[in-house]
Image (spheres, helix red, strand yellow):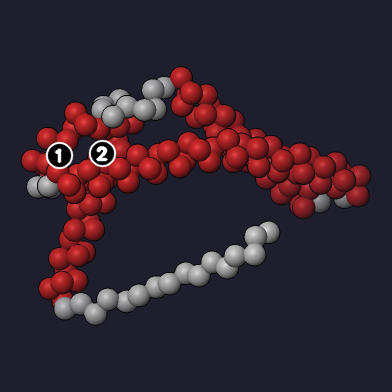
Amino acid sequence: MADTVTFTYQDRLALSPEQDAALAAYCELSGRVVEKLFVAYAAGARINDLKSAYLERFGLTARQFNAIAIGLKGKIAAIKERRAGLIKETKARILRARAVIARLEKRAPHSNTLHRKRRRLATLQARLGRMQSDHAYALTYDCRRG
């Protein structure tokens, strides 16, 4: 492990009720735009083709839209980058669950613990299947659309 220390800082803003309302409204608008943009992107639209329509529809500036689009692209890229590691981790968990089940089948063949471990294994296998399916789809789907 590295010898570096990570510090996390938090600050509370002293805002007037009007400032708080304005920030809350902008956060709500920004979140709605991100959701709509992701849905359109997932449906196959190019983000840059949606720009002028979103500027007019949501009353955004081009700079605000670009910031939202870049943030969304970053989130999508991070999830895709992490997916291979998650698949590997899930496979390791499945192997471990199978070993625990094999041990429990010998010690307590009709226990609730064994039942719960089998259910957990089924859940892990279903999750792995979904992740592998998503991963295979992402490899065939053009992920670099603008």
Query: For the view shown, which residue lies furthest in the front direction?
Result: 3
**Residue 130, position in %: x, y?**
54, 32
Q: Label 2 neighbourhood size at 10 Å, few (<14), some (14-19), many (20+)?
A: many
- The three-letter amino acid code for the residue at tag 2 is Leu
Which residue position holds label 2?
A: 37
Looking at the image, which residue is at 25% across and 47% down? 67
| Contact check, label 1 and label 2, Cβ < 8 Å | yes
In the rendered image, the vertical position of residue 12 relative to residue 22, given as above or below: below
Residue occupying image coordinates x 69% and y 37%: 91
Taking the view exactly as shown, the residue that stands out farthest to the right is 106
Q: Which residue is mark 1?
A: 54
Question: Vertically, is 8 above or below 100?
Answer: below
Q: CA distance from mark 1 to mark 2?
A: 9 Å
The label on residue 32 is none
Amino acid type, residue under disc 1 in the picture: Tyr
Q: Is residue 115 left or right of residue 23?
A: right
Q: Identify which residue, 73 or 125, lies in the foreground.
A: 73
Secondary element under disc 1, as helix, strand or loop, is helix
- N-terminal-most mark, 1 or 2: 2
